[in-house]
Image (spheres, grey):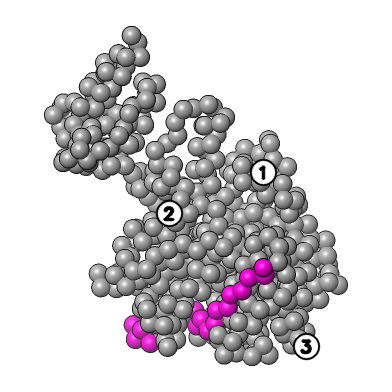
Amino acid sequence: MNVEDEVRSTIARALNVPIDQLTAETQLQDIGANSLDVVEIIFDLEEKFDITIPAQISAQQAPRHGLEYDTVGAVAQAIKGLVDAKHS
Amino acid sequence: MNRVVITGIGVVSPVGRTLDEFWSALIEARSSIGPITIVPTERLSARIAAQVLDFNPRAHFEPKQASLLDRFAQFAVFAARAAVRDAGLQIDEALALETATIVGNAAGGQGTVDESYFKLYGQNSSRVHPLTIPRWMVNAAASHVSMDLGLKGPTFTTASACASGTHAIGQAFHMVRLGQVPVALAGGSEACITVGTIKCWEALRVLSSDTCRPFSRNRSGLVLGEGASMVVLEGRDRALARGARVYAELLGFGMSADAFDITAADPDGGARAMRAALRDARANPEGVDYVNAHGTGTALNDRVEAIALRQVFGPHCDRLAVSSNKGVLGHGLGAAGAFELAATALALHTQTIPPTANFDEADPECLLDVVPNVARAAKLQTAMSNSFAFGGLNAVLVLGRA
């Protein structure tokens, strides 16, 4: 499984939604994620990939939801970057 | 001022999760104290407790809700739901806005703390679960009860160790009596049977290694328990108007501090709280028929409580029935006062005194009628429930037959 698929399956499990409903553009908030869900998802991903996700939640960065990682794609992108950085 | 009555009781206890199971175990002096099975015991010297066994959170909570609730909050929500059901109370939006939720708790989410710190220190993990704080915080039980039942009135936690549940119920009683709220849900909850917590209790050298024998000459210490009890309190007029069954009336609440020692109790402090509760109830000591004692089963507590009772009741002490529930339920800390308030209300309701379990022989330093091992039918008009906490914080409730 590649990083993107892992991220999708983690989010699908955490929010109890079918994995095939998740695209890169899917807004986490639209599929029922609240701020606690997001920190849980981040925790699961950190454990899975053995990385540390800098999760500064700043209104400036994410004015709409107060969440920095607001789409499935944004989460996958961030994870990919961190995983690559670990291996480089 | 409103008269205040108890119309609903909910429990999740080491002797069961229904009122029938709870009361029949107390009446039959059936102790729930046994070998610890819910956590590993290899590193423990004290290997007995009064545990709530076979409590499966998934049977009572959606996975999402369950992941947010430490065991102590699960217990509180379970007991609160049961109390509202038992009261036959319909909580509409208007009532929800006014209903108070007050939950006593001594230690917070100790299971969550234990797990997180084991990860951190034992497994050298660099992170702990993100829900650690919301699960652990000492107000989590009160918050989850309010969220689960949609109660939006005054809501908070009382933390006074072994008197937490009694302080919670006392506060709720006064709020209803003063007309600040029409209905209150109050009680106590605790779940601190963890390896870390028991180790800390062992270090204090107050835990028994055989069983809890309140007021018995051969008593050997307290035994930790767990669980929750919640009661529905409402104005008497309101309760009667809706045809509610009334278990008992709350008559008085008294509090005091020993300002003496952080663990050793002082008879003067307990006596002052009992007198304050009697004053608040406008009752005479001679009118009290039964005292549900704090009765932890430690050498010191029971002796001090006997002295305090003698100070308050004088010669009437010789006619007074006094019993402790802790031989059956162990010491539920923040839940203890709430369990015992429930037991005292049921004693008035059924006109039966629950006995002091595991009693072997009288202690000349605790010369009381402790209703040893066998329940007693009695005419009970007025009863008292004592809670004397570590830290010298005392809370006493006086109840009357409904």
Tell which subunit mark 2 falls on: B
Instruction: Give the numbered dot on residue B199.
Output: 1
Q: What kind of residue is marked 3?
A: Pro
A48 vs B162: above or below: above
Q: Which residues are magenta?
A: B237-259
- Based on the picture, tell me whether residue B254 belongs to the magenta stretch: yes
Instruction: Report the residue marked by disc 2.
Output: B140
**Identity of the residue drawn at 78% across and 69% down:** B303
Tell which subunit mark 3 falls on: B
Sort mark 3 into few (<14), some (14-19) or many (20+) by Cα contacts within 10 Å.
Answer: few
Residue A84 image position (x, y, % from top left): 30, 13
Q: Quadrant of the N terminus of chain B?
A: bottom left
Q: Earlier in the sequence, mark 1 or mark 2?
A: 2
Instruction: Report the residue marked by disc 3.
Output: B315
- In the image shown, does B30 or B93 lie closer to the viewer? B93
Residue A47 image position (x, y, % from top left): 39, 26
Sort mark 1 into few (<14), some (14-19) or many (20+) by Cα contacts within 10 Å.
Answer: some
- Based on the picture, tell me whether residue A65 belongs to the magenta stretch: no
Instruction: Give the numbered dot on residue B354.
Output: none
In the picture, measured across the screen, residue B308 lies left or right of residue A81, that is: right
Q: Quadrant of residue A79?
A: top left
